[in-house]
Amino acid sequence: MTEKVFIIFQRLHGRDEYEGTGIGLALCRKIVEHHGGAITLDGTAGPGTRVSFTLPVARPEPDLGAEEAARPPEGAHT
């Protein structure tokens, strides 16, 4: 049942109970997974459902020298 909320336009309740299009959690899942993370649901946290996500730690950019940083990327039109 929990996977159903991540399917685009799938609704667990009728439109008369809750508003919305049914794309919110499906879109969130796509974004989180695109960045290498995971999204989970916890329905035991009391009324409602807790939505949690994790994302990997970003790697720092390599330190570029001033000359190299000022150069346009390969293939760039100047």
Image (cartoon, rainbow, N blue to C red):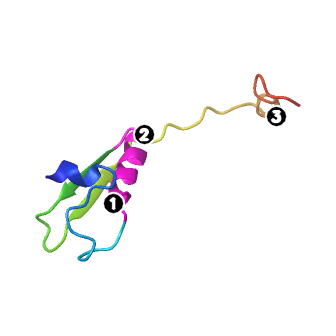
Q: How far apart are marks 1 and 3 (CA)?
A: 45 Å
Where on the picture, by quarter, is residue 18? bottom left
Q: Mark 2 points at which residue?
A: 34
- For badge 1, the amino acid type reads Gly
Q: Name the residue under label 1.
A: 22
Magenta residues, start to end: 21-37
Residue plotted at (13% across, 72% down): 46
Between 22 and 30, the one nearer to me in the picture:
22
Sequence-earlier tag: 1 or 3: 1
Residue lying farthest right?
A: 78
- For marks 1 and 3, give the one nearer the viewer: 1
Between 65 and 48, the one nearer to me in the picture:
48
Q: Mark 3 points at which residue?
A: 70
* Quadrant location of the C terminus in the rendered image: top right
Sequence-earlier tag: 1 or 2: 1
Residue plotted at (59% across, 36% down): 61
Q: Do the residues labelled 1 and 2 touch (CB within 8 Å)?
A: no
Q: What element carries label 3?
A: helix
